[in-house]
Amino acid sequence: MFQAVIEMPEGDTRRRHMRHDQTGIVDLGVLKEKVPVNNGVMPINYGFIPNTKNPAEGDELDVIIFSEEKLEVGEQVDFNVIALLRRADGDDKIVGVDTRNKNLFESWEDISAPLQNLVLEFFAYIAPIIKIESKENAENYILENTI
């Protein structure tokens, strides 16, 4: 189990990101201007894993979290890892499931094909997703990049 901070909840239309000095989340404008997929609506909860460092970007590791709960900007949520989306630009995405939703998904393969396709299309808009890796590889990736 790991913990994340939500920057953009599912359904959000704004680009939000934690300041590099960790003093708060800033609004960077309309999401549709950066990612027009899904009409610029975040299809899943998006955030970061505190105390980690993405080797490609220098900020925290990104995480997308499936949840049946309504999550809010800045909310901390415990999650179980189910996969790692490797992107061509190195800005990889951890895939997780809110621990309060034990029966939601246990692996990437449990997610319906339409939802998988939407997530992949959305997060591949800027850089292609080149590989989907296992839960074990995703957990190791987090541990290797914990500071």
Image: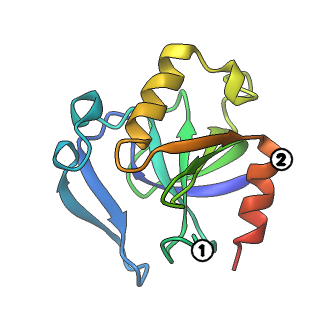
Where is 13 relative to 89, above or below? above
Disc on the earlier residue, 2 or 1: 1
Asked if residue 107 lies left or right of residue 15, the reply is right
Asked if residue 34 lies left or right of residue 141, the reply is left
For the point 80% across and 59% down, the residue is 140
Number of other residues with Cα within 10 Å of mark 2, as a class: few under 14, some 14 to 19, many 20 or more: few
Measured from the top left, where is residue 103 in percent x and y? 73, 21
Task: Check if mark 2's residue and mark 1's residue have beta carbons within 8 Å.
Answer: no
The residue identified by callout 2 is: 136
Instruction: Provide the secondary structure element on which disc 1 rests.
Output: loop
Q: Is residue 1 visible?
A: no
Q: Is residue 54 visible?
A: yes
Measured from the top left, where is residue 126 in percent x and y? 35, 49
For the point 22% across and 50% down, the residue is 34
Measured from the top left, where is residue 107 in percent x and y? 74, 29
For the point 46% across and 32% down, the residue is 119
Q: Could you say which is closer to the camera, residue 37 or residue 23?
A: 37
Q: Give me the disc on residue 53.
A: 1
Instruction: Provide the secondary structure element on which disc 2 rests.
Output: helix
Q: Give me the disc on residue 114.
A: none
Task: Name the amino acid type tagged 1.
Answer: Lys
Measured from the top left, where is residue 124 in percent x and y? 43, 42
Res 79 quadrant in image: top right
